[in-house]
Image (cartoon, coloured by chain):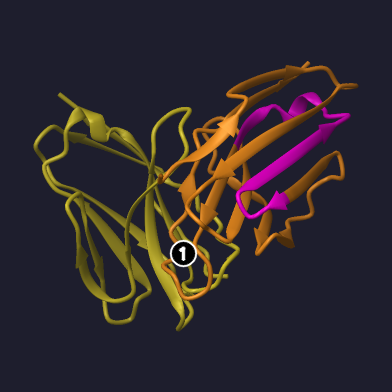
């Protein structure tokens, strides 16, 4: 299984863009990259998933370079409510019951 | 319905008690998961059920016993727990083969073992 490495924490201010990079040097050919957001005492919530290049949805963008050994989650114009822990997961898509293991996560604090 | 429902939200039990955590989803998902999360740590995978069969057991002690009565329900039976087992227990589900693999989590059951 590909192991992931993320910064432990990041601080930002309201209205700024936050970029969180995840390293996954031994990612496999059939692995996808998925990001989750977790607020205290709640279950993680899916943000975005991608395989290569760039993926964008209404809340975030995911940038994946050609070698796929890292990925960057971009949160545009953050607000106080974006303060949370963000997890990067790497694993195969398309199989039920995958061994989806969380890495350490990045604690993002958005300040006024 | 895109929810995973976990009950109870809070549970306090003694080390000699037997209790159960319950999880339910009505999204037609064929994989269900139990994770354990300690404070300020990432969720740790415990068990995975795929098409109602236990497919992954991450070397979890036998005092935790999972059960999947049908495709919508997942239980975690607890017996003779230790205080260090106190944690947030998260249930999740995902679609079956050929799908995105996105995990849908419940709000968790906060367990305190005295």
The residue depicted at 80 percent of the width and 33 percent of the height is B78
Quadrant of image for the C terminus of chain A = top left
Position in image of residue A102 (x %, y %): 52, 53
- Residue A43: say if magenta: no
Q: Which residue is mark 1?
A: B101
Position in image of residue A12 (x %, y %): 20, 36
Q: Chain B, which colour?
A: orange
Q: Is residue B40 above or below residue A49?
A: above
Q: Nearer the viewer, residue B85 or B1?
A: B1
Number of disc labels: 1
Would you say A7 lies left or right of A64 here?
A: right
Q: Is residue B112 above or below residue B64?
A: above
**Which chain does tag 1 point to?**
B
The residue depicted at 21 percent of the width and 28 percent of the height is A80
Position in image of residue B79 (x %, y %): 86, 31
The residue depicted at 64 percent of the width and 46 percent of the height is B73
- Residue B77: say if magenta: yes
Query: Which lettered chain is shown in yellow?
Result: A
Position in image of residue A39 (x %, y %): 39, 33
- The crowd level at tag 1 (other Cα within 10 Å; few <14, some 14-19, many 20+) is many
User: Where, by quadrant of the figure, is residue A101 drawn?
Assistant: bottom right
The residue depicted at 39 percent of the width and 61 percent of the height is A34
Q: Secondary structure at mark 1?
A: loop
Quadrant of image for the N terminus of chain A = bottom right
Q: Is residue A106 above or below residue A30?
A: above
Q: Which residues are magenta?
A: B69-89
């Amino acid at each position: 299984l590909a192991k992931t490495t993320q910064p432990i924490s990041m601080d930002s201010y309201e209205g700024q863009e936050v970029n969180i990079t995840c390293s996954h040097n031994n990612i496999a050919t059939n692995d996808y990259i998925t990001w989750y957001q977790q607020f205290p005492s709640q279950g993680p919530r899916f943000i975005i998933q991608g395989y290569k290049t760039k993926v964008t949805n209404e809340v975030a963008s995911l940038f994946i370079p050609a070698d796929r050994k890292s990925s960057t989650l971009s949160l545009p114009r953050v607000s106080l409510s974006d303060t949370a822990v963000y997890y990067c997961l790497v694993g195969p898509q398309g199989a039920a019951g995958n061994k989806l293991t969380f890495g350490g996560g990045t604690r993002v604090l958005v300040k006024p | 319905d895109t929810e995973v429902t976990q009950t109870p939200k809070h549970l306090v039990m003694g080390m000699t008690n037997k209790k159960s955590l319950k999880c339910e989803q009505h999204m037609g998902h064929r994989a269900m998961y139990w994770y354990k999360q300690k404070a300020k740590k990432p969720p740790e995978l415990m068990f995975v059920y795929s098409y109602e069969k236990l497919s992954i057991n991450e070397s979890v002690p036998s005092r935790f016993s999972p059960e999947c009565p049908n495709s919508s329900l997942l239980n975690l039976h607890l017996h003779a727990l230790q205080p260090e087992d106190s944690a947030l227990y998260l249930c999740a589900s995902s679609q079956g083969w050929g799908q995105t693999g996105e995990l849908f989590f419940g709000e968790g059951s906060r367990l305190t073992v005295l």
